[in-house]
Amino acid sequence: MAARRPAATDHRAVTELARQLGALLAELSLTEIEVDLGHARLRLARAPAAPALPAASAVHVPAASAERPAPVVDAAPATAVTIEAPMVGTFYRAPSPTADPYVREGDVVKQGQVLCIIEAMKLMNEIESKTGGRIVRILVENGQPVEYGQPLFLVDPAG
């Protein structure tokens, strides 16, 4: 019996799945779809459509921009841990507007390390990592409002 490569390294299968999900995204008019395969997590999102120009506009829009935008493929390891917002508030990556962010994508963090601040009712609440590892993705933009349970970071404990 021949040994099969681990599914996590089968890029052709992931690419084919991304194509199928992209077709489903368009067919159902979805803006985003995410699938967890056990060995990989796949997220596809369409960029918002550009606003339509008035009919009397003299601006020429190339034909390519009128097509639907291509889906964005974003794969993260299945072992990635999601750090979620423990409250409703405003997400801040740094302690002040002029300070460096607490973390950047690719940084290695320790359990209990401050990742961001969520401002709620004029109180600044430091949000700590619940695991050590490498920051794979920062899922929220600085200054964006967040909801309870909203994913903020993906941390790969193996990283």
Image (cartoon, helix red, strand yellow):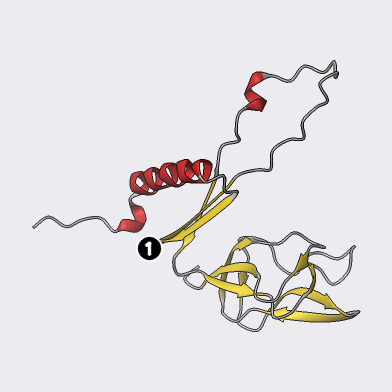
- Up-down: is 133 above or below 139? below
- In the rendered image, residue 86, in percent from the top left (x then y), is placed at 69, 80
Quadrant location of the N terminus in the rendered image: bottom left
Q: How many marks?
A: 1
How dense is the environment of label 1, judged by Cα within 10 Å: few (below 14), some, or many (20 and up)?
some
Say which amino acid is labelled 1: His
- Up-down: is 128 above or below 147? below
Q: Quadrant of residue 60?
A: top right
- The residue lying toward the viewer, choosing from 132 and 69, is 69
Q: Residue at x 85, y 18 (%)?
A: 56
- The residue lying toward the viewer, choosing from 21 and 99, is 21
Q: Residue at x 67, y 26 (%)?
A: 65
- In the rendered image, residue 151, in percent from the top left (x then y), is placed at 63, 69
- In the rendered image, residue 92, in percent from the top left (x then y), is placed at 80, 68
- Up-down: is 126 above or below 18? below
- Up-down: is 115 above or below 5? below
Q: Please state if 107 lies on the left or on the right of 53 as rendered.
A: left
Q: Residue at x 79, y 75 (%)?
A: 118
Q: Secondary structure at mark 1?
A: loop
Q: Quadrant of residue 58?
A: top right
- The residue lying toward the viewer, choosing from 139 and 109, is 139
Return the residue found at the far left.
1
Task: Determine which residue is flagged by label 1.
Answer: 39
Q: Quadrant of residue 70?
A: top right
Q: Please state if 50 lies on the left or on the right of 122 as rendered.
A: left
Q: Residue at x 46, y 59 (%)?
A: 35
